[in-house]
Amino acid sequence: MDLISVLRDLKNNDMDMETAETLIRSMGYVSVADIAKVDVFRKHRTGIMEAILAEGKEPEDVIDIAKVQVLSTRRVLITRINDKHRERLVKAFKPEELEWDLHSTAVVVHDGTPAPSSGGVVGIITAGTADINAAEEARMVAHEMGCETITIYDVGVAGFQRLIGEMSRLHDKKPDSIVVAAGREGTLPTVVSGLVDVPVIGLPVSVGYGAGAKGEAALLSMLQSCSVLSVVNIDAGFVAGSFAARIANMVAKARNCYENDNDDI
């Protein structure tokens, strides 16, 4: 069933509003040649944005998909870009249409529309500087989903005093959720979760060598955590950022409702 049919049935009272809304939400995608079907309605349907995974895609395909998505959603995040993707993006878009982060393999392409603001706050913490790439992917996702982000980098347990010195920033900003990225033995998320009263998402990073290399030890350590936290897959910055932002946005929505109710009293 296409959009015209749904609208016609709704107009003729052959379909109720709830059914029409469900059908319209399920059909929100745009085809790009024979290579992709861009889910432009995903954010409205699930609260999580549609992003472009550049890994495994030819630069030209990434450009074509990005142009279609920007036309439909105004902004799009592209993750896991390489030098060839970066070079082609610079040629295809104006400098003011690109938002880079030097520490990340992700980029935002937009038409000048600013990122939304939900009122949610997400903390992003890394154990070491080698974990920043994955953490920045999470940060950019949270930002694109409307959250303010707080970054605290290179505060691993090998120098625990560094984390203690930064904890005041978390108390001041009061994040609604926190992503903690760590490689090697992956201890930091457990420590952070034992110090804060908000959900913590562990992001294992493929840093380390020997037994348990490529993030495997970090993943298993986080899964065995004695403090309560959620854990995503190795280097899954997009998933960690989306989950953290979804929590933060729900908290922000509830907070706004509470404040509005109190204003009416």
Image (cartoon, rainbow, N blue to C red):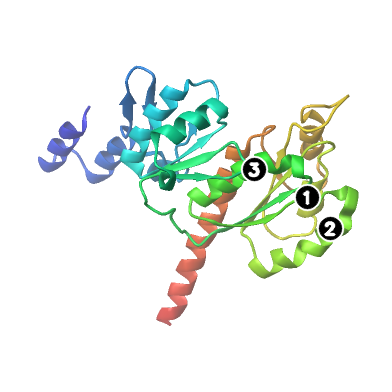
Query: Relative to the observer, which residue lies in front, 153 or 183?
Result: 153
Residue 244 visible in the snapshot: yes
- Mark 2 and mark 3 in contact? Answer it, CB < 8 Å: no
Q: Residue at x 78, y 46 (%)?
A: 127
Where residue 46 appears, as percent x and y from the top left, is: 44, 42
Q: Are marks 2 and 1 in contact (CB under 8 Å)?
A: yes
Whichever of callouts 3 and 1 sits on the residue coming sooner in the sequence is: 3
Q: Secondary structure at mark 2?
A: helix
Which amino acid lies under the numbered mark 2 shown in the image of this protein?
Answer: Arg
Q: Tag 1, which secondary structure?
A: loop
Quick one: label 2 or label 1, which is nearer the N terminus?
1
- Left or right: 78 in relation to 74: right
Left or right: 94 as drawn, with respect to 222: left
Identify residue for label 3: 103
The image quadrant where one finds the C terminus is bottom left
- Amino acid type indicated by mark 3: His
Q: Residue at x 73, y 51 (%)?
A: 153
Q: Is residue 200 above or below residue 94?
A: below
With respect to residue 55, does 89 lie above or below?
Answer: below
The quadrant of the rendering that contains the N terminus is top left
Query: Could you tell me which residue is drawn at 56 percent across and 55 percent down?
Result: 248
Q: Earlier in the sequence, mark 2 or mark 3?
A: 3
Q: Which residue is mark 1?
A: 154
Occupied quadrant, residue 234: top right
Q: Residue furthest left?
A: 12
Residue that protrudes farthest toward the top in the picture: 34
Task: State the residue position of label 2.
Answer: 162
Amino acid type, label 1: Asp
Element assignment for label 3: loop
- Whether residue 90 is situated above or below residue 228 in the rendered picture: above
